[in-house]
């Protein structure tokens, strides 16, 4: 995405890379981050990540599941005036990743494309997934998604939860 890492003796412009980059926590920590994006979009699945970067090259895309230390350092160094979005799977784990992003970064991530999409052939929720959804539906950090979490609980199935079932233009 539109990111540059400025070190004392050189700058790395990530816009020149076609397929993104994996950054080490130590490199992020010792650099200044310059970012021209107005939106930062974290994307849970790699296939969706690549599709979105092609459709929205002006945005900063970060491929992450549960955020690691490098992801957290990068997010903390970004300008607080950009819009933060998370595009994850609409399953219990996807919502838990959103919760973790919000809690670990204190950034106002807005979920996109994380709606219940019924699919009668999908697997039923497991007991562990039901317990997780119950916990998440009462978590204050997921208040904007509470109705979706309750709808997923009431549906009792995973539905077409994977990001690949979303329309890519929904952000």
Image (cartoon, helix red, strand yellow):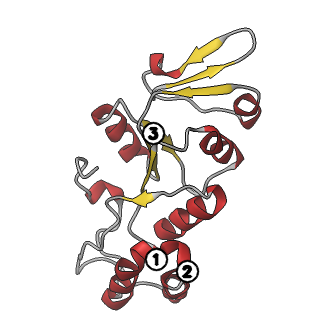
Left or right: 98 as drawn, with respect to 156: right
Q: How far from the left and from the top, in percent, is residue 70?
A: 68, 42
Q: Residue lying at the far front in this picture: please name it.
A: 81
Frontmost of labels 3 and 2 is 2
Q: How far from the left and from the top, in percent, is residue 142?
A: 49, 73
SS of the residue under disc 1: helix
Q: Is residue 115 above or below residue 121?
A: above
Rendered residue at 61%/58% (across/down): 106
Rendered residue at 36%/30% (across/down): 58
Task: Tell me which numbered mark, 3 or 1, is placed earlier along the sequence.
Answer: 3
Q: Which residue is tagged 3? A: 61
Q: Which residue is tagged 2? A: 139
Alpha carbon separation for disc pair 3 and 2: 26 Å
Frontmost of labels 3 and 1 is 1
Left or right: 60 as drawn, with respect to 58: right
Rendered residue at 73%/28% (across/down): 27
Q: How far from the left and from the top, in percent, is residue 20?
A: 49, 29
Q: Is residue 104 above or below residue 34?
A: below
Q: Based on the displayed image, in which of its 4 quarters is residue 147 positioned? A: bottom left
Q: Based on the displayed image, in which of its 4 quarters is residue 54 positioned? A: top left
Q: Is residue 49 above or below residue 158?
A: above
| Label 2 neighbour load within 10 Å: few <14, some 14-19, many 20+ | few
Q: Which mark is residue 11?
A: none
Alpha carbon separation for disc pair 3 and 1: 24 Å
Q: Which residue is tagged 1? A: 143
Callouts 2 and 1 close, C-beta under 8 Å: yes
Left or right: 112 as drawn, with respect to 3: left
Rendered residue at 45%/39% (across/down): 61
Image quarter (top left, top right, bottom left or bottom right) of the N terminus? top left
Q: How far from the left and from the top, in percent, is residue 16?
A: 46, 16
């Amino acid at each position: 995405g539109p990111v540059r890492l400025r070190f004392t003796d050189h700058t790395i412009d990530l816009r020149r890379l076609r397929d993104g980059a994996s950054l080490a926590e130590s490199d992020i920590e010792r650099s200044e981050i310059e970012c021209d994006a107005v939106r930062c979009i974290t994307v849970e699945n790699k296939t969706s990540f690549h599709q979105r970067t092609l459709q929205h090259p002006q945005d900063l895309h970060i491929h992450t599941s549960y955020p690691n230390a490098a992801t957290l350092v990068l997010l903390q160094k970004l300008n607080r005036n950009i819009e933060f979005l998370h595009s994850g799977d609409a399953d219990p784990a996807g919502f838990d990743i959103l919760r973790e992003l919000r809690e670990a970064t204190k950034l106002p991530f807005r979920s996109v494309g994380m709606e219940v999409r019924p699919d009668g052939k999908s697997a039923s929720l497991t007991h562990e997934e039901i317990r997780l959804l119950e916990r998440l539906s009462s978590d204050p950090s997921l208040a904007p998604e509470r109705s979706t979490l309750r709808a997923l609980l009431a549906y009792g199935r995973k539905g077409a939860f994977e990001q690949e079932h979303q329309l890519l233009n929904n952000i």
